[in-house]
Amino acid sequence: MNSPTSDLEPQIAACRLCAPRFAATATGHDPRPVVWFRPEARILIAGQAPGMRVHQSGRPFHDPSGDRLRDWLGLSLDEFYDQSRVAIVPMAFCFPGYDAKGADLPPPPICARTWHAEVMARLAKVRLRVLVGGHAHRWHLGTRTPVSQTVANWREHGPGVFPLPHPSWRNTAWLRKNPWFDAEVLPALRAAVRRVMNDQPDPA
């Protein structure tokens, strides 16, 4: 029997809506959607958009940011890439390119408008949502607060949602200035991830 996502994944993989947009960037690249989800997944990692390394490899978070994120989650490589348990759905499936100064461009909103609601509808078994960065915070939480404030208020979102900063090296200074993230958020996050990975119930 075909998976409920079997019709959706090839549609996303074949998407070329942003081809003219990407061609006009400093990188001048073609679209390459990175699709990584299955309907049986219990954990959702909602990120921003693939970077250049992920664009080249076709594997989400296949970069130093992914190494840091896996450490935050307490997941091994095999666990992280186990699509039967972990879905990785960014706000844009393709690398958006660089601007003239070499900085990552934001995820094109047309990607989330076109695909995100339908993908989320297929992920009905998700118990834990890990929201990485401001773009994911805004879509999933409807918040317009700064990332630091949203992450600081992590307890308000319940045991099934964790808003995180992006694990990029650019946020290393932020992590040093906010030791509460490592001391308070990460232990709770790792405990929640392990409960879901082991099919254990949430605490009452």
Image: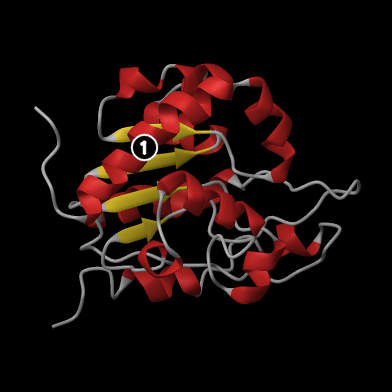
- Residue 194 x, y percent position in the rendering: 27, 49
Above or below, comparing residue 148 to residue 140 in the picture: above
The quarter of the image holding the N terminus is bottom left
Residue depicted at 54% across the width and 70% down the height: 59
Q: Amino acid at mark 1?
A: Leu
Q: Within the image, what quadrant is residue 62 found in?
A: bottom right
- Residue 152 x, y percent position in the rendering: 48, 18
Res 146 visible:
no
Residue depicted at 60% across the width and 21% down the height: 178
* SS of the residue under disc 1: helix
Above or below, comparing residue 96 to residue 149 in the picture: below
The residue identified by callout 1 is 189
Residue depicted at 38% across the width and 28% down the height: 141
Q: Within the image, what quadrant is residue 54 found in?
A: bottom right
- Residue 132 x, y percent position in the rendering: 50, 40
- Residue 104 x, y percent position in the rendering: 75, 48
Above or below, comparing residue 62 to residue 168 in the picture: below
> Tag count in the figure?
1
The quarter of the image holding the C terminus is top left
Is residue 131 found left or right of 106 in the rendered image? left
Is residue 45 found left or right of 91 in the rendered image? left
